[in-house]
Amino acid sequence: MIPANQFIVQTLGECRFDSPISDWLLKRAAFKPGIGVHDRMLFHDHLSTITEYASLELDQIPSFEVAGPRRKLYFDPAQTRAGIVTCGGLCPGLNDVIRGLVNVLWHRYGVRQISGFRYGYEGLNPAFDHEPFALDPRLVKDIHHDGGTILGSSRGPQDTDAMLDYLVDRQINTLFTIGGDGTQRGALDLSTRARERGIPLAVIGIPKTIDNDVRFVEQSFGFQTAFTQAVDAVKTAHNEAVSAQNGVGLVKLMGRHSGFIAAYAALAANEANVVLIPEVDFPLHSDIGLLETLRKRLLTRNHAVIIVAEGAGQRYLDTTGQDKSGNKQLGDIGLFLKQEITSHFSALKIPHTVKYIDPSYMIRGCPANAFDSVLCFRLAAYAVHAAMAGCTEMIIGKWHGKFLHIPTALAVSNRQQVNPFGDLWLSVLEATGQPRWQAVEEHHNE
């Protein structure tokens, strides 16, 4: 059990200003007495956990703070200067989140000073000389129709004190960081340093990870768009495979450490015969290995479709070093498998055709679908509510169906992965009929 104190969100101090919607909040409280934004959501939602909590005081039970507007604000909206930054790789919905932040800040709270910092954390380092955008509702009116981010993005950290000094010089007191694990670690360093220096800076993260691998976040924005778009690639691979003698369609999808996109795309397309993810090891040459499984499939059905997440099978690839985000450099498992399949069946003198499809950048740069657009706006709105109330060192996430305040340190302490013994992976095994290979690690979560 995670200690309850790790679920506490940091705040900048006492909230003294009335919210512009305090009257609405009072009416809502009267309509639903005892239910409000100061409720907490249990970390576990299983009935079996009640016995674990039975002997604990309420403040000892692990629980999350429920997100939403507060009646009192820490920041005076008239004196609030907000900043927005997008970091890391592209993901569907980035522009939707920017638009949502600007509109809620402007229309709900009357904040008129909103800066969009260019090219990720580079935009907070004056050494790069990236002049920020002045954002308003008119400027962001139509940006949700386009993929990518109007602010630009970059990978990698910057000097924390240089960024903090830059924010102080521009009188920014609320910063919204849209990015993944590395981005939020950088945000945590920034907010921690601000607290050490006595600077009242609210730093709120909106988790952006197309791989859906942020802990305590059921689905990150852009994920539904990603696996929906991936379905088209899987169907195309299937069309190629069935149109050739012993045709093999091989699709590589995003997923450095977590195979959620591969798993969901396989279930949605219902055309995959093998799915390979980072959480599950797969042998190549054994009696139940990938190549023998593929040979049996071609012998009986004359075609096969393989979906592989980019982080799967890395033990077969000799790679060293790190990328700009500090992640281990990955080898190209897609090209490796294409070569292995070709060599294997050529040696067996079995005629075959392998078609390799990598739609990653087409997916990353596309606009969000309807579901993700709604999720983006709601995440943005809850982020603004939290910032105006003086919350900091936290991200907004949806967990057990509720939007919650999740301490950043807790969110980045581990990675969300597909559980090789859970319902999702069991569904993939049932849909594909592939062998049940060994889990890479014993402990995963969904």
Image: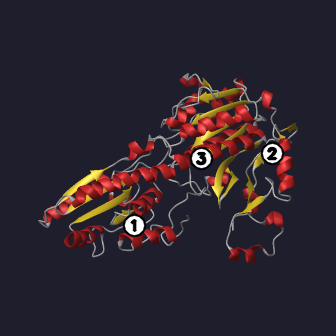
Check disc 3 and give the amino acid type.
Val
Check disc 2 and give the amino acid type.
Arg
Q: Which residue is mark 2?
A: 70
Q: Is residue 186 above or below residue 9?
A: above
Instruction: Give the mark nearest the N terminus, 3 or 1.
Output: 1
Q: Position of residue 77 (x, y in %)?
A: 79, 31
Q: Which residue is mark 1?
A: 281
Please give the name of the residue rendered at 53% of the width and 47% of the height, measured from the top-left corner: 370
Q: Nearer the viewer, mark 3 or mark 1?
A: 3
Instruction: Give the mark nearest the N terminus, 3 or 2.
Output: 2
Q: Position of residue 437 (x, y in %)?
A: 39, 72
Please give the name of the residue rendered at 42% of the width and 50% of the height, measured from the top-left corner: 229
Residue 253 visible in image: no
Q: Is residue 307 above or below residue 177?
A: below
Element type at marker 1? loop
Q: CA distance from mark 3 to mark 1?
A: 36 Å
Please give the name of the residue rendered at 44% of the width and 41% of the height, measured from the top-left corner: 366
Location of the N terminus by quadrant is bottom right
Q: How many marks overall?
A: 3
Q: Position of residue 264 (x, y in %)?
A: 45, 60
Check disc 1 and give the amino acid type.
Asp
Q: Position of residue 123 (x, y in %)?
A: 57, 29
Q: Which residue is mark 3?
A: 374
Q: Nearer the viewer, mark 3 or mark 2?
A: 3
Determine whether label 3 and label 1 are within 8 Å by CB. Answer: no
Please give the name of the residue rendered at 49% of the width and 67% of the height, measured from the top-left corner: 424
Q: CA distance from mark 1 to mark 2?
A: 47 Å
Q: Is residue 101 left or right of residue 423?
A: right
Q: CA distance from mark 3 to mark 2?
A: 22 Å
Q: Is residue 43 left or right of residue 96?
A: right
Element type at marker 3? helix
Indicate the quadrant where residue 96 lies.
Answer: top right
